Amino acid sequence: MDELYTFLRDNYIEDDNGEFRFDYSKEIIKWAIQKPGFINDWCLGVRSAKNQKILAFIAGAPSKITIYAKTTIKAAIMSFLCVHKKLRSKKLTPVLIKEMRRRIQGAGYQHAVYQGGDLVPTPFTKALYFHRSLNIKKLVDIGFLQLPKNMPLARYVKQYKPPNLGQCDLIGNPRLMEKKDIQGVYDLFKKDQKKFKVHFKLSQEELAHLLMPIKGNLWTIVFVDNDKNQITDFVTFYRTASTILKSVSQNFESHKGQHNHTDLQIATVLLHSCNTNNLGEVLKYVCHYSKNEIQDRPFDVLNIIATRDLEVVAREVKLGQGDGVLNQYLFNYEF
């Protein structure tokens, strides 16, 4: 795992300007790859013949997908496709994909799920990026945000100050998910998935793996109706750090200069189910929690990748829509 972490840290996805590169923790990489039903043969790497260092990697995980509430298919979830920066002209990616296809088909899987920012034929849906800035000064320092024209930095900071607990209009008591909550959360999840025409069909064990908190890396907040002793809502987010590749902010005239920041701490929302609480209030609480309740490496920005719901609450949560689109693909299936 140490070797894979180092390879991804140094070679995984960068933004178009070469200023930020994803830096997933070892815990998150393991959580994403080693799901229930993990197949070791679906972790595929290419090593150097000279020094045995990793040159390319791709991972797959088994899953089931329900389509239009009628059909359930087995599919492999593809993730962490990465080729060393110096070898991207060597056409290793098609070789990896071809070999992974052979392996998953050999295990009886005819379909695969993958996603990407580049548009190729043909996505079955797309998701939009939304951001909620939490640490304005740092985000301006590193060039992640542009200071609006004629706006003092102090006013910008005040405008996007994360809400405190008293500003979150919540029903029930929020707390971290515990093992005793798995059944209640699973019931909410199954009910929520029925709203989608295409969705993952997860067992209780699989959902528990996805949502049980991982110290310093993943949080699931449940909202409890104490009178009924019942979980009414939940939201899950995890840490997605990025390495800052440039020490000088160069994106705009209003705030150039040297900075000493080395990383960008991002909270990414994975799942949410809101039945009693308003989604906007739940997200405001996540902003409060991720900035004020997490003492070790507090978050700088909240990211949400979503296909639904967010437009109606974007203004009250102060979400900004990102430029990118995340296209979702299902290989070898015709809708």
Image (tube, rainbow, N blue to C red):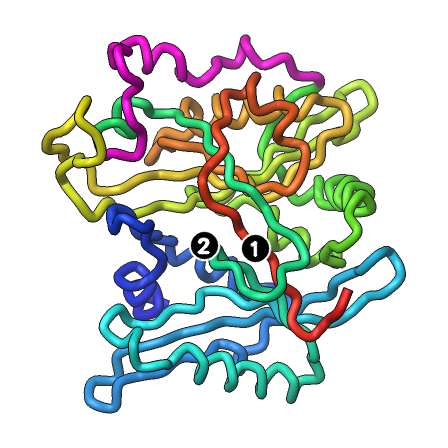
Nearest-to-viewer mark from 1 and 2: 1
Q: Can you say which quadrant of the picture contains the N terminus?
A: bottom left
Q: Residue 205's spot in the image, x, y percent? A: 70, 58
Could you tell whether 128 is left or right of 179 in the image? left
Q: Residue at x 33, y 25 (%)?
A: 135
Amino acid under label 2?
A: Ile
Q: Residue at x 25, y 51 (%)?
A: 18
**SS of the residue at dot 2?**
helix
Q: Work out how far the residue at label 1 is from the one at label 2, CA to CA, in angstroms.
A: 22 Å
Residue that numbered label 2 is attached to: 28
Q: Which residues are magenta?
A: 143-171
- The kind of residue tagged 1 is Asn
Q: Secondary structure at mark 1?
A: strand
Q: Is residue 247 left or right of residue 54?
A: left
Residue 156, quarter of picture: top left
Residue 138 image offset from top left, x and y in percent = 26, 28
Viewport quadrant of the C terminus: bottom right
**Relative vertical location of residue 246 with respect to residue 111 in this rendering, above or below:** above
Q: Which label sits on residue 233?
A: none
Indicate whether residue 247 is drawn in magenta.
Answer: no
In front of the other: 166 or 67: 67
Q: Is residue 225 toward the left or the right of residue 155 in the image?
A: right
Residue 17, percent from left and from top: 27, 48
Mark earlier in primary sequence (1, 2)? 2
Identify the residue shown where x is 71% and y is 40%. Answer: 181
Question: Crowding at label 1, few (<14), some or many (≥20) Cα neighbours within 10 Å?
Answer: some
Residue 86 sits above or below residue 100 on the image: above
Reading the image, the residue beneath label 1 is 327
Residue at 31%, 83% (x, y): give it. 47
Q: Quadrant of residue 109?
A: bottom right
Q: Residue furthest left?
A: 258
